[in-house]
Image (spheres, rainbow, N blue to C red):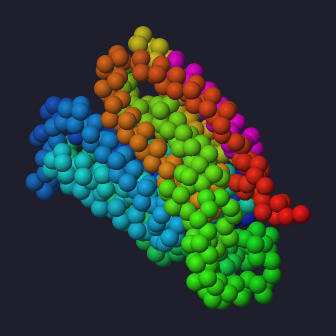
Amino acid sequence: MASFHAFRDLTPTFIYLLITATIGPLLFGFHLAELNAPQEVITCAKKGLLSVTWSRDGLEQRSLGLPQCIPMDTLQFGMVTSFFTLGGLAGALLAGPMTAKSGRLRTMALTATFAVTGPAFEALAPSFSVLASGRLLSGIGAGAATVVVPIYISEIAPPGQKGFFGSFTQVMINMGILITQVMGLFLSRGQLWRVILAAAGVMAVAQIAGLIIGGQESPKWLVDNGKPAQAKRVLQKLRGHRVDVTAEVNGWGIQSEHHLESEEETLLADDRAAHALASEDTRPSGSRSEGSKGLGPFAVLVHPDYWPAVFAVATIMVAQQLCGINSIVMYGVALLSDLLAANSALLNVVVALVNIVVTVAGAPLVDRLGRKTCLLMSMGGMGVSSLVLGFGIMNSVPVLSAVAVLCFVAAFGLGLGPVPFILSSELVNSEAVGATQSWALAANWIATFFVAQFFPIVNEELGKGQVYFVFAGFAALFAAFTAWWVPETKGKADADEVWGRKKPQDLVD
């Protein structure tokens, strides 16, 4: 209740930036599910469609000479689906260094251009290769968005509500899935599937326009890059002119107005000296100043303070996929078509809606119960639901299967959906967050690739439904890892407190 009460205190600037930034995760969810409902139409599996043309008021329109559908077998369709994940992997690896060097705002704007060009290739694809290329480009944009947007939200969100607003990354992913599933209900015929694919490009254009017109850089990135006065101005816009932001500003290590106003001049004057000191100090451990540059992707892997966090977040990101959520998002309609016939597409719409409702309703629990508790509850619920779903599909029990799918997705939305995107910005300090997020999302995209590429094949080889027993085993395995390795971040001021490390001031007697 407190979280919803706090909405009254949010400024239009913060709401605008939250919505504009999270169009990126929305497009990630959209692309994940865009081929689900129209799969049979796109691959020419449905007969009797070749004579269909677009019409309105009886006036027939030509389809630009594009083929009605693109013949693909199971392997080829799996490749088209998984090419999106390969692009996502590339985008995730590129976005980490870019967001540290160029800033969160510029990174979002630049990578959104891939989210425009990819759908253009997809919607106008005359062949398998062009469709796969478009999916690859769309994946680059989506992969970058899933790195930078959670960091950005964490850095602009009000203190004490970072977990709640961090959940909006997953909320918008689910919203993208819902939009494409609803469109699939009405547009999975003729050449109208091309409209579904083109819609993502239109949304990406809207995001670029929004970032250019009213975008603001993250105050945290500004202060870390020697611009504390500008950072305070942006922070004041985010919180409102009547709000005292002194406590947040002091959290940057700037104690006075005089210090704040003179800091940029001092940092500029000392920039060369700071770089010289940084290059001399090659030790892997030790604290960095607020104005220091971020660590690179390979530096965090060997840094004694950060490799445990990279390992923790990357493993949780793999768990998000290997517990089986995208088997429903990407292949749910085909998977359940034998049991539910025409209702399988409708069930996937309901699934997407349930995912949104649970993620939004459960968002306050992330701050109330803690990140680790929500993860364990989520993995437990998914594991049990997987067992029930496998039994339901194997024994052709439609109602049981449908209920198991809904419970499976609800359990995902409770913790394993939103929490992994939050952890990267809480388990490490700001200098390592970009690189850590890149490794985490790289692991996520690799796991997504394996699910996208091999789920249809494994499902056929094992027999329908039995693969969910494998997913249940993964849920148990990752729950044990979480209980053993992953620390709780709720209520902790920074990564040093999370991992129980002594801060520099604590070492001075």
Residue 459 in view (yes/no):
yes
Q: Nearer the viewer, residue 81 or 262?
A: 262
Percent across and percent down for residue 470 are 46, 22
Q: Residue at x 52, y 17 (%)?
A: 388
Q: Residue at x 63, y 28 (%)?
A: 480
Q: Residue at x 53, y 44 (%)?
A: 314
What residue occupies the far top of the structure in this picture? 395
The image quadrant where one finds the C terminus is bottom right
Percent across and percent down for residue 397 are 44, 13
Image-based side of 35 in relation to 316, left or right: left
Percent across and percent down for residue 159 are 73, 60
Image-based side of 169 in relation to 67, left or right: right
* For residue 329, above or below residue 157: above
Magenta residues (range): 365-389
Q: Is residue 387 magenta?
A: yes
Magenta part mainly helix, strand or loop? helix
